[in-house]
Amino acid sequence: MRRGVYQPHQVSAQVIQNWVRRNPVEGAALLQTNDSYVFFRRVDQVPAEKGPLGAMNRSITTGRSIAVDPAYVTLGAPVWVEKGGNGPIRRLMIAQDTGSAIKGAQRGDLFMGTGDQAGRIARRLRDPGRMVVLMPIQRAYALAPEALT
């Protein structure tokens, strides 16, 4: 959009993916400037059916793993996730990964699996929602502002 190629209403992950394929040199340059672009590395010691490794160096689980900002959510913490809109979600997930574009207390990226079908599902998850991090009460009190304790 900043380059004047598309208007905001025209942009989707699929549109960007197609443009990068049609423009390999410019596309490579674009991907290098985008903090949200995900770079993968091949990991052969984990069977594909176990899922990719997250930031905890453990396999992440389709529909149950969430990437978070570790400055706000401890890796391994259970997180209750709710969102309405297209494909409502209300479920317990585990904070097992991080991401360079995930910044802030109420930001997360739900892992919906691998492959084309998972990609189509993930592209539709843009609705606002809420996350509730579950933790022992003592830890919650330790993190609470003084006014609340």
Image (cartoon, rainbow, N blue to C red):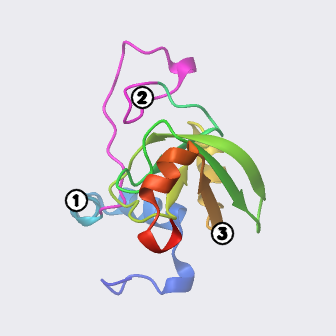
Distance Cα–Cα, label 1 vs label 3 = 27 Å
Vertical arrangement, residue 90 with respect to residue 60, above or below: below
Q: Give the class, few, some or many, for how many residues have Cα within 10 Å of label 2's Cα (few <14, many ≥20).
A: some
Name the residue rendered at 30%, 32% in the picture: 41
The residue carrying mark 1 is 32
Crowding at label 3, few (<14), some or many (≥20) Cα neighbours within 10 Å? few
Residue type of the residue flagged with mark 1: Gln
Residue bounds of the magenta highlight: 35-58
Q: CB under 8 Å between callouts 1 and 3?
A: no
Q: Earlier in the sequence, mark 1 or mark 3?
A: 1
Residue 53 tag number: 2
Considering the numbered disc 2 on the image, is that residue within a helix, a strand or a loop? loop
Of badges 1 and 2, the one in the foreground is 2
Residue farthest to the front? 149
Secondary structure at numbered mark 1:
helix
- The mark that comes first in sequence, 2 or 3, is 2
- What residue did someone put label 3 on? 127
Label 3 is placed on what type of residue? Answer: Asp
> Given the image, on which type of amino acid does mark 2 rest?
Leu
Q: Nearer the viewer, residue 107 or 138?
A: 138
Instruction: Name the residue nearer the viewer: 57 or 76.
Output: 76
In the displayed structure, 104 sits above or below 69; it is: below
- The main secondary structure of the magenta stretch is loop
Q: Is residue 53 magenta?
A: yes
